[in-house]
């Protein structure tokens, strides 16, 4: 589904990604872990098309298409979804209206007819249950005055609505208490299928107790320095990132 | 200096033109002309008109030696109306009241509308005429007081709600030649009455248009006025509007000024809160493109204690357009417990668009709550990316954010048909469909 080869990217003059290789297939969950500043969020942003970053080398194929040539909205229409680490507050735009516009844009791109108001509302109600989010919250301005947990639940709600092929969760666990974490993880798990894939970007192992990955990759200084199964996350938790750093220093 | 030269020339031409009108013998008008001569046309150094080079535009684009009334061949005015809005209609074409196009549908028991020219010589109008709006303070106010061609006097009796809004439509016919017009309005809302007043400018033709407008609106005790001004004239309109709304105790005021088009638009908008327990919402929105210049000079004057005013003006400037906002708030020594808020927010879409914003608060009372703030910036890149990451294109995302920014100013509008119309104008301008 996603094939990243030797991806290098910089912001301003600062090189952040130094040659990433990553292969994600349908039905898989990949966890990207790493210490602060290792480039985790940058990788997520570059995949979603954030223009602050400049890709200097490498390629990214998504379902056979050159992802790097696509606008952020085209990537979304192709089936990529980024759950933001810091969801943006947008006064004056309600989540409901925003989702209706977004969903119909994506449907249009895929050659599907627009959903009418009734069908949209029905779909929304169904997806709301998944993340235990209240309709009154969705009628309000997008993320404005939402708590950290509400913002993250709103991200997963949007993900449920748009049904992406590849979901990238950028530090979705940050700022969540244990209950909110469980709800968010539960939502993600219910959306998992053999046809879609998930990349979970996280600093801590905690989230991975709920969203169990098939693969764990450790990112350090803009490169994937270690890959393994879900047990790698536990090992990291026990030994800390210094273990990786020391191992690299010795090598 | 060239500045002084054209000032004198143009001023002299206007004075000479006045001397050829039958109105030259009218005492009030002669005095107004004297004020105009004294004040002179504003030059580039005149503080109040620093960013609105109206004199230069008049000098360059108009012939003030032609004073004959310009006849119009406009047959239908349907295109200038507000769709589906049942309203009383007062139409001026090139400054002249058009009885053919005007239409009053409300009963006389609700509203009395009369010819202002006649009314100023009768019993009631002279009590209010030029009472609160002083001829001596602004050159274009003085000019209008000397030269106004036609006007209407609107009275709403006590304890009366005018069910249908009143639209005052200024049409300029610039098909054959330039159009110069001066019109006038006097409105009195008696105690406990209610009115929705809509003003709109429109034009046909490609020639230059100069329109001065002056209005005095008296809102008496417990009366309530909803006021909407729509400046969406796609012609070469140069307009200076002087407005004064005078509020008495426990009155309510909602105003909304929407500026979308025109060459040079200057609104001098004054509110005198001369009573206790008044509530005033004072909103404006300017969405400019091309070379349009829109200058909103507003004054909120709190003369009495215990009143509330909230001013919110927002602007989006595209192309080479220029936005100007100047907001003065006065809180007089006796006006304790005043709550006065002001906010001006601007978004610039291009490097060539500009905005000049200046809040001015003068507070003489010590027990008041007042705040003001102004911002100018671009669209938030982070918000744009967020919307795009959900499948919405860059242009649509921009439209969505601008619409969300702008639409807050429509809050005070109560009439649903009017609100839909205004919403459609805003959506269209921001490319949101």
Image (spheres, coloured by chain):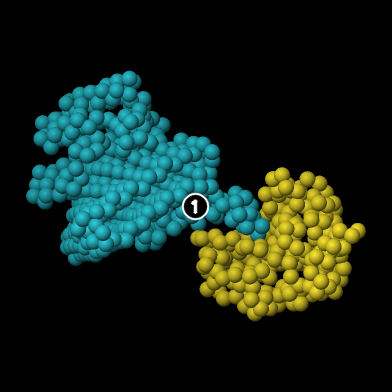
Chain colours: A yellow, B cyan
Q: Is residue A132 left or right of residue A22?
A: left
- Of the 4 image quadrants, the one containing the N terminus of chain A is bottom right
Residue to which mark 1 is pinned = B427
Given residues B259 and A5, the one toward you in this image is A5
Q: Is residue B181 above or below residue B104?
A: above
Given residues B167 and B218, the one toward you in this image is B218
- Of the 4 image quadrants, the one containing the C terminus of chain A is bottom right
**Residue B177 percent location from the top left of the image:** 35, 28
At x 59%, y 56%, the residue is B383
Q: Is residue B95 above or below residue B154?
A: above
Q: Residue furthest right?
A: A251
At x 13%, y 37%, the residue is B28
**Residue A60 percent location from the top left of the image:** 81, 53
**Quarter where residue B358 is shown:** top left
At x 87%, y 60%, the residue is A248
**Quarter where residue B111 is shown:** bottom left
Circle 1 SS class: helix
Q: Is residue B381 above or below residue A26?
A: above
Kindly identify which chain the residue marked by label 1 belongs to: B
Given residues B313 and A161, the one toward you in this image is B313
**Residue B209 percent location from the top left of the image:** 35, 33
């Amino acid at each position: 589904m996603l094939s990243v080869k030797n991806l290098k990217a910089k912001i301003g003059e600062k090189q952040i990604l130094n040659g990433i290789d990553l292969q994600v297939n349908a039905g898989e969950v990949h966890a990207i872990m790493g210490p602060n500043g290792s480039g985790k969020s940058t990788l997520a942003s570059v995949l979603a098309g954030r223009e602050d970053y400049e890709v200097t080398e490498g390629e990214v194929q998504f379902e056979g298409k050159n992802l790097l040539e696509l606008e952020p909205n085209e990537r979304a229409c192709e089936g990529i979804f980024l759950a933001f680490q810091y969801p943006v507050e947008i006064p004056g735009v309600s989540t409901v209206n925003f989702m209706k516009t977004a969903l119909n844009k994506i449907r249009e791109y895929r050659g599907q007819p627009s959903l009418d108001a009734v069908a949209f509302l029905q779909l929304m109600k169904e997806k709301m249950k998944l993340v235990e989010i209240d309709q009154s919250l969705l009628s309000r301005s997008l993320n404005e005055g939402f708590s950290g947990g509400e913002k993250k639940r709103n991200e997963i709600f949007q993900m449920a609505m748009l049904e992406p092929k590849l979901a990238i969760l950028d530090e979705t666990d940050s700022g969540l208490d244990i209950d909110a974490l469980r709800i968010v993880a539960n939502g993600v798990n219910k959306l998992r299928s053999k046809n879609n894939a998930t990349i979970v970007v996280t600093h801590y192992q905690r989230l991975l107790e709920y969203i169990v990955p098939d693969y764990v990759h450790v990112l350090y200084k803009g490169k994937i320095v270690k890959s393994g199964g879900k047990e790698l996350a536990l090992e990291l938790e026990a030994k800390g990132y210094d273990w990786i750093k020391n191992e690299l220093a010795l090598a | 200096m060239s500045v002084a030269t054209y000032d004198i020339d143009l001023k002299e031409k206007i004075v000479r033109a006045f001397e050829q009108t039958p109105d030259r013998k009218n005492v009030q008008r002669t005095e107004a002309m004297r004020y105009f001569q004294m004040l002179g046309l504003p030059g580039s150094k005149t503080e109040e008109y620093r960013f609105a080079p109206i004199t230069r535009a008049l000098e360059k684009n108009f012939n003030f030696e032609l004073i004959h009334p310009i006849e119009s061949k406009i047959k239908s005015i349907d295109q200038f109306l507000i769709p589906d809005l049942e309203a009383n209609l007062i139409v001026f074409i090139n400054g002249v009241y058009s009885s053919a196009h005007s239409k009053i549908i409300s009963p006389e028991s609700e509203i009395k509308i009369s010819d202002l020219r006649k009314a100023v010589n009768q019993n009631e109008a002279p009590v209010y005429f030029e009472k609160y709006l002083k001829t001596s303070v602004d050159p274009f106010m003085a000019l209008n007081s000397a030269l106004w061609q036609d006007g209407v006097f609107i009275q709403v009796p006590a304890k009366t709600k005018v069910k249908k809004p009143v639209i005052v439509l200024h049409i300029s016919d610039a098909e054959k030649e330039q159009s110069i017009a001066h019109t006038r309005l006097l409105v009195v809302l008696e105690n406990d009455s209610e009115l929705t007043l809509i003003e709109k400018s429109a034009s046909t033709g490609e020639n230059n248009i100069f329109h001065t407008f002056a209005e005095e609106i008296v809102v008496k005790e417990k009366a309530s006025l909803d006021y909407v001004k729509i400046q969406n004239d796609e012609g070469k309109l140069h307009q200076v509007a002087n407005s004064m709304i005078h509020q008495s105790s426990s009155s309510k005021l909602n105003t909304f000024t929407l500026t979308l088009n025109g060459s040079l638009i200057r609104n001098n908008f004054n509110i005198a809160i001369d009573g206790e327990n008044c509530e005033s919402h004072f909103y404006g929105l300017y969405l400019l493109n091309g070379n349009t210049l829109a200058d909103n000079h507003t004054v909120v004057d709190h003369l009495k204690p215990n009143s509330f005013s909230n001013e919110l003006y927002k602007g989006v400037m595209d192309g080479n357009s220029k936005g100007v906002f100047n907001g003065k708030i006065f809180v007089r020594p006796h006006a304790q417990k005043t709550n006065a808020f002001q906010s001006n927010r601007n978004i610039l879409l291009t490097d060539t668009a500009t905005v000049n914003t200046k809040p001015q608060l003068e507070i003489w009372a010590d027990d008041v709550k007042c705040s003001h703030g102004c911002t100018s910036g671009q669209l938030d890149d982070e918000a744009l990316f967020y919307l795009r990451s959900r499948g919405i294109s860059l242009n649509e995302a921009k439209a969505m954010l601008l619409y969300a920014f702008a639409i807050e100013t429509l809050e005070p509008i109560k009439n649903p048909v009017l609100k839909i119309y205004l919403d459609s104008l805003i959506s269209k301008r921001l490319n949101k469909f």
